[in-house]
Image (cartoon, rainbow, N blue to C red):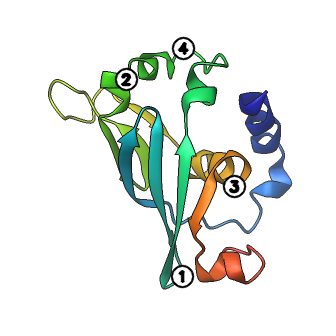
């Protein structure tokens, strides 16, 4: 249901008109399937915590994300514009890496995550510039 909600949102072109997602600055593994995520804002940062357990284990995330069901793989995360799980053996961004677009990650955070620190845009009605 959560992934279907994202797909419906992503397939609506009006959501992307005049959109300027700045992306992730950082991702921190907190334990289990929880991450703390820093989003870049205009001269500020917004921080969320998001539990991926329901997204990865209670739903079918699709074949690209299934490797992340292994907690050892999930822990090897990085925020660098996108949310990236590098190759755990080499640390490389190669064909075994898994990534999620920042727009998807922000959507999941806003709908299913916990806001830790709002940025200025969140305080000003959520309009991103």
- Of labels 1 and 4, earlier in sequence is 1
Which residue lies under the disc numbered 2?
71
Q: Position of residue 33 (x, y in %)?
A: 46, 33
Of badges 4 and 2, the one in the foreground is: 2
| Secondary structure type for disc 4 | loop
Of badges 3 and 4, the one in the foreground is: 3
Q: Position of residue 50 (x, y in %)?
A: 56, 46
State which quadrant residue 122 falls in. bottom right
- Of labels 3 and 4, earlier in sequence is 4
Q: Residue at x 45, y 53 (%)?
A: 36
Which residue lies under the disc numbered 1?
42
- Of labels 4 and 2, earlier in sequence is 4
Which residue lies under the disc numbered 3?
110
Question: Do the numbered discs 3 and 4 sit on residues whose CB atoms are within 8 Å?
Answer: no
Mark 3–mark 1 distance (CA, rounded to whole Å): 18 Å
Mark 1–mark 2 distance (CA, rounded to whole Å): 34 Å
Of badges 1 and 2, the one in the foreground is: 2
Residue 48 or 43: which is nearer the viewer? 48
Mark 4–mark 2 distance (CA, rounded to whole Å): 16 Å
Which residue lies under the disc numbered 4?
63
Q: Residue at x 61, y 83 (%)?
A: 120
Q: Is residue 38 above or below residue 75?
A: below
State which quadrant residue 76 falls in. top left
- Residue 120 appears left or right of 124: left
- Of labels 3 and 1, earlier in sequence is 1
Question: Do the numbered discs 2 and 3 sit on residues whose CB atoms are within 8 Å?
Answer: no
- Label 3 crowd bin: few (<14), some (14–19), many (20+), radius 10 Å: some
| Secondary structure type for disc 2 | helix
Q: Position of residue 29 (x, y in %)?
A: 36, 44
Q: Is residue 85 above or below residue 29?
A: above
State which quadrant residue 93 falls in. top left
Image quadrant for the N terminus?
top right
């Amino acid at each position: 249901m959560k992934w279907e909600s994202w797909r419906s949102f992503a397939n609506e072109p009006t959501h992307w008109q005049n959109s300027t997602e700045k992306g992730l600055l950082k991702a921190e593994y907190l334990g289990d399937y929880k991450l703390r995520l820093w989003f870049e804002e205009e001269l500020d940062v917004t921080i969320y915590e998001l539990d991926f357990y329901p997204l990865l284990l209670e739903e079918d995330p699709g074949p690209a994300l299934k490797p992340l069901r292994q907690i050892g793989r999930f822990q090897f995360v990085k925020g660098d514009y996108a949310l990236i799980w590098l190759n755990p053996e080499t640390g490389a961004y190669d064909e075994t890496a898994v990534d999620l677009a920042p727009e998807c990650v922000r959507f999941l955070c806003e709908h299913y995550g916990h806001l830790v620190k709002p940025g200025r845009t969140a305080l000003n009605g959520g309009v991103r510039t």
